[in-house]
Image (cartoon, rainbow, N blue to C red):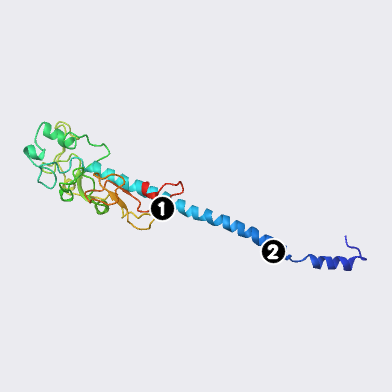
């Protein structure tokens, strides 16, 4: 405590204690620099991790859309059918009686239909003779959509296939049944979050997973065009 005798000395010591010395400033700036240097990589990794999450979500979304298109293609445009809806007569169209109706209900060729598929693709113009697996011919088809009809609906007879004695499965088609809606599988063209462009590496069902060029037969899978490494050490193009 400063007494009256030491008042002048205490005042001078108080004046001298104000401000920082050069050493204190150097130490403070050094600590701040270390904190900034350590924070920048964390911020960069946070941005990179966010892009990786978006890439995984985009890949999952597109692959689900491809699988859904594939499910809806079962029973569409059977071999030997010339009508756009894949419906014909006799042995060629698969619509008749007995086992022929059974094959239509099963998706054609006796292949069971996935219960998640409620419609069947009714546009044979998007399929050609090389795309035997009936995967989407391009990403544009998934975005623009395709014409579909209710699975099991007889577009020519106006009835639903099933037991004729069951009122729930045997009814006359209404005006809404004759209209062919368009089903869209993707809302928009997917963008690669890593490259910022829709420059995906696409492969068909007839190519191996390491193919760098697309044969343009169908879209079986896609992966990022970036060869950069993810935070886990894997390449984005391997996801």
Examine the rendering and report whether any part of residue 45 can be seen: yes
Q: Residue at x 81, y 65 (%)?
A: 14
Q: Quadrant of residue 10?
A: bottom right
Measuring from the top left, give residue 201's x and y in whole percent. 31, 52
Measuring from the top left, give residue 33's x and y in whole percent. 61, 60
Residue with the most extreme left position: 90
Measuring from the top left, give residue 73's x and y in whole percent. 21, 43
Q: Which residue is mark 1?
A: 228
Q: Quadrant of residue 1?
A: bottom right
Q: Which residue is mark 2?
A: 25
Asked if labels 2 and 1 touch by Cβ distance under 8 angstroms, the answer is no
> Does 26 appear above or below 99?
below
> Nearest the camera: 56 or 210?
210
> Does 38 appear above or below 76?
below
| Camera-nearest label, 1 or 2 | 1
- Secondary structure beneath dot 1 equals loop
What is the spatial separation of the Cα atoms under label 1 and label 2, in whole angstroms? 41 Å
Q: Residues within 10 Å of mark 2 (few under 14, many from 20)?
A: few
């Amino acid at each position: 405590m400063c007494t009256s005798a030491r008042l002048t000395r205490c005042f001078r010591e108080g004046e001298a204690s104000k401000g920082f010395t050069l050493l204190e400033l150097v130490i403070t700036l050094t600590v701040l620099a270390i904190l900034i240097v350590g924070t920048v990589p964390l911020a960069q990794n946070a941005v990179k991790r966010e892009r990786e999450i978006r890439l995984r979500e985009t890949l999952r979304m597109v692959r689900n859309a491809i699988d859904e298109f594939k499910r809806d293609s079962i029973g569409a445009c059977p071999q030997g059918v010339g009508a756009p809806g894949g419906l014909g007569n006799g042995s060629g169209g698969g619509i008749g009686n007995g086992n022929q109706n059974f094959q239509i209900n099963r998706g054609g060729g006796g292949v069971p239909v996935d219960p998640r598929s409620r419609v069947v693709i009714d546009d044979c113009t998007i399929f050609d003779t090389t795309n035997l697996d009936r995967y989407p011919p391009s990403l544009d088809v998934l975005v623009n959509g395709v014409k579909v009809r209710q699975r099991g609906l007889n577009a020519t007879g106006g009835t639903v296939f099933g037991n004729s004695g069951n009122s729930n499965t045997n009814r006359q088609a209404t005006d809404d049944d004759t209209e062919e809606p368009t089903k869209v599988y993707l809302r928009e063209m997917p963008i690669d979050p890593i490259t910022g462009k829709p420059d995906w590496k696409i492969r068909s069902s007839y190519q191996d997973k390491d193919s760098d060029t697309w044969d343009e037969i169908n879209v079986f899978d896609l992966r990022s065009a970036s060869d950069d490494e993810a935070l886990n050490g894997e390449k984005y193009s391997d996801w």
